[in-house]
Amino acid sequence: MTLPRLIATDLDGTLLRGDGTISRRTLDALRTAADAGVEVVVVTARPTRYVDALAEVTGLSGTAVCSNGAVVYDIASRTVVESRVLSADAAQAVAGAVARVINEVGFAVETGGSVIYEPRYRLRFAELPGFESPVRALADLWTLTTPIVKLLAHSERYDADFLLAVAEEAAPGLAQFTHSGGPGLLEISAPGVTKAGTLAALCAERGIEAADVHAFGDMPNDLTILNWAGTGYAMGNAHARVLAAVARRTLSNDEDGVAVVIERLFGR
């Protein structure tokens, strides 16, 4: 069996168990791959601050592709290597188009360092308290001087799959739409920004071809990378769209599915 030159793995629902931890078995498997010269790249919807917090607990290092491809991040030095942000004009146009179709939706912007939300956006994240702040009105989001890494749209009534379908029809070409399984949460990036596009550019810089990449994921935002990589694995707990589109399967995140494949690769 030919070993990959690079392993790309999502975090939530893939590398992380349901309780948000990485098992000792999985950490040992990643270390085995790294010791053999295989680069491990985290490719996640999460912002850089979450990767920092996870690295402090687990010792993860190397390169991370964050915010669905909008940011390339050096974990050890906590440095943003590259970013592709959404313009305020595009964000405002997308929000207007979506809101004209769905009234029950709120918006927030992810800056990489924080989430800034308007009154109708009611989703809160408890993992990293202190990184969320409000503005008085939706219009205030478009006057912020901080970069928009992602625009977030949340509905307490509709699920993420429905929001994705609405956005793709209401605002085609204005942005890149996806979701990572958050309840009623749509994630919106600059046009053309995907996990696969950013990873492909990163691999090209290293002289690594898609055929030399193994990738793991579970949600629709992982589909681009699972289809681009030479070998893509859908987790056993993956979204129905992912399971339908990706032939290779491994066990669920709670069964250490990523570790199972790496152990098999290295004969462990």
Image (cartoon, rainbow, N blue to C red):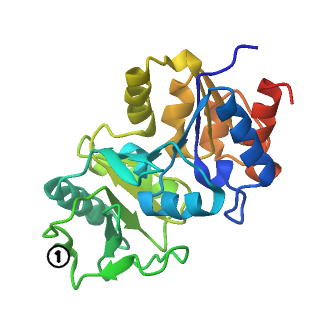
Looking at the rendering, in which quadrant would you find the C terminus?
A: top right
Answer yes or no: is residue 236 visible: no
Measured as percent of width and height from the top left, residue 139 is found at 16, 74
Provide residue 72's location: percent of width, then percent of height.
38, 43
Q: Dividing the image into 4 quarters, which one contains the N terminus?
A: top right
Find residue 245 and report its horizontal and vertical position in percent. Answer: 61, 31
- Residue displayed at 27% across by 45% down: 84
Rendering quarter of residue 149: bottom left
Figure check: 224 above or below 230: below
| Residue 218 place in picture, x, y as percent | 63, 45
In the rendered view, tell whether residue 6 sits above or below residue 115: above
In the image, 4: left or right of 261? Answer: left
- Tell me if I can see residue 196 in this picture: yes
Q: Residue at x 54, y 78 (%)?
A: 126
- Name the residue located 37 percent from the left edge and 64 percent from the top edge: 153
Q: Secondary structure at mark 1?
A: helix
Tell me which amino acid carries mark 1: Asp
Q: Which residue is mark 1?
A: 140
Residue at 24% in and 56% down: 94
Q: Foreground: 90 or 150?
A: 150
Left or right, 258 with reference to 124: right
